[in-house]
Amino acid sequence: MTAGQESVMAGANNTPATVRRFTAQQKQAILQAYGEWPGHMQEFCAAQGVSTTSLCEWRRKYQAHGAQGLEAQRGVSRTRHHGPYPPAARQQAVEAYRKSGMALDEFAKVWRVTPHSRGRGGGSKWGR
């Protein structure tokens, strides 16, 4: 196995699959080589062992942020929604609302929650 590759078990029959993780320098070199490639993107990507989706994402990040945009972003969620708030955060939000004096709709926008949230008893957990 070469540098930048990790073996993982995938598929119904647990056959080994290869997942490649490229460094920023490798990504930049691949982008430069693609810029000089006379053929189609699919052919280039197949020869490099890179998906066309990854190549397009790297190009977009490089154009927007330069070489720094190609650095690994470990721990960064790609989604906007991060799941339910943990109980401590919910309690903090309720207490902050009660102390704020803000209208419920206004407070809900600030905290990015629905003003119609219900507690376990069926009543509004935001009640004053």
Image (cartoon, rainbow, N blue to C red):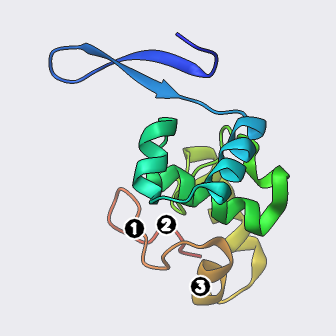
For residue 125, the mark is 2
Q: Nearer the viewer, residue 69 or 126?
A: 69
Q: CA distance from mark 1 to mark 2?
A: 6 Å
Q: Which residue is mark 3?
A: 104
- Which three-letter amino acid code belongs to the residue tagged 2? Lys
Residue 81 percent location from the top left of the image: 51, 60
Query: Does residue 71 appear to the left or right of 113 in the view shown?
Result: right
- Asked if disc 1 and disc 2 are in contact, CB closer than 8 Å, the reply is yes
Place residue 16 in its image quadrant: top left
Q: Farthest residue in the top direction? A: 1
Residue occupying the point 63% across, 45% down: 88
Task: Name the residue located 53 percent from the left edge and 53 percent from the top edge.
Answer: 82
How crowded pointer 1 is (Cα within 10 Å; few <14, some 14-19, many 20+) is rated as few
Label 1 sits on residue: 118
Q: Horizontal and vertical percent for residue 58?
A: 64, 54
- At which x and y percent is residue 113? 54, 72
Q: Is residue 120 left or right of residue 92?
A: left
**Three-letter residue code for mark 1:** Arg
Q: Which label sits on residue 127?
A: none
